[in-house]
Image: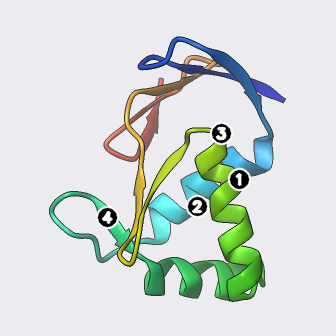
Amino acid sequence: MQKLVLKTIGKEREVPLIYEKALQFLDRKAKNRTKSGIIRFSDVYLIFAWYMRLNKAETRIFLKELENYGLIEIIPYNGIRIRKNTQFAGGEKWKNGDARD
């Protein structure tokens, strides 16, 4: 488990590595986004169904878990947005959907 520091909240939480990897994978594979950075649900379902073999119900549960950890924001009837300014204990920082040192 890696520690996650949410700068906006100031709390530390441990995030399972699979959540971080899934988020990086989703960020890499999502080609069509809105100007505000929203990835449509249809694209999210397609990516998780094709690459992770999850059905829609499992994808919804997985997205809720990612939201509970503060990694994404679910926009009702629209899609998801990967949250910015999330820093992992290893020094990687999410900014504009990129993991960087």
Residue 8, image x, y percentages: 41, 20
Residue 6 left/right relative to 95: right
Query: Where's the N terminus, which quadrant?
Result: top right
Viewer-nearest of discs 4 and 1: 1
Pointers 3 and 2 in contact (C-beta within 8 Å) = no
Q: Residues within 10 Å of mark 1 (few under 14, many from 20)?
A: some
- Estimate the spatial distance between the alpha carbons at disc 3 and disc 4, rounded to whole Å: 18 Å
Viewer-nearest of discs 3 and 2: 3
Residue 64, image x, y percentages: 65, 58
> Disc 2 designates what residue?
25
Indicate the quadrant where residue 54 lies.
bottom right
- Label 1 is placed on what type of residue? Glu
> Disc 3 designates what residue?
69
Q: Residues within 10 Å of mark 2 (few under 14, many from 20)?
A: some
Q: Residues within 10 Å of mark 3 (few under 14, many from 20)?
A: some
| Mark 3 or mark 2, earlier in chain | 2
Residue 32 left/right relative to 66: left
Q: Residue at x 57, y 83 (%)?
A: 45
Residue 77 vertical placement versus 6 (above, below):
below
| Mark 2 or mark 1, earlier in chain | 2
Dot 3: what SS?
A: loop
Dot 2: what SS?
A: helix
- Label 4 is placed on what type of residue? Ile
- Label 3 is placed on what type of residue? Tyr
Q: Residue at x 37, y 69 (%)?
A: 39
> Disc 1 designates what residue?
65
Disc sitting over residue 38 in the figure: 4
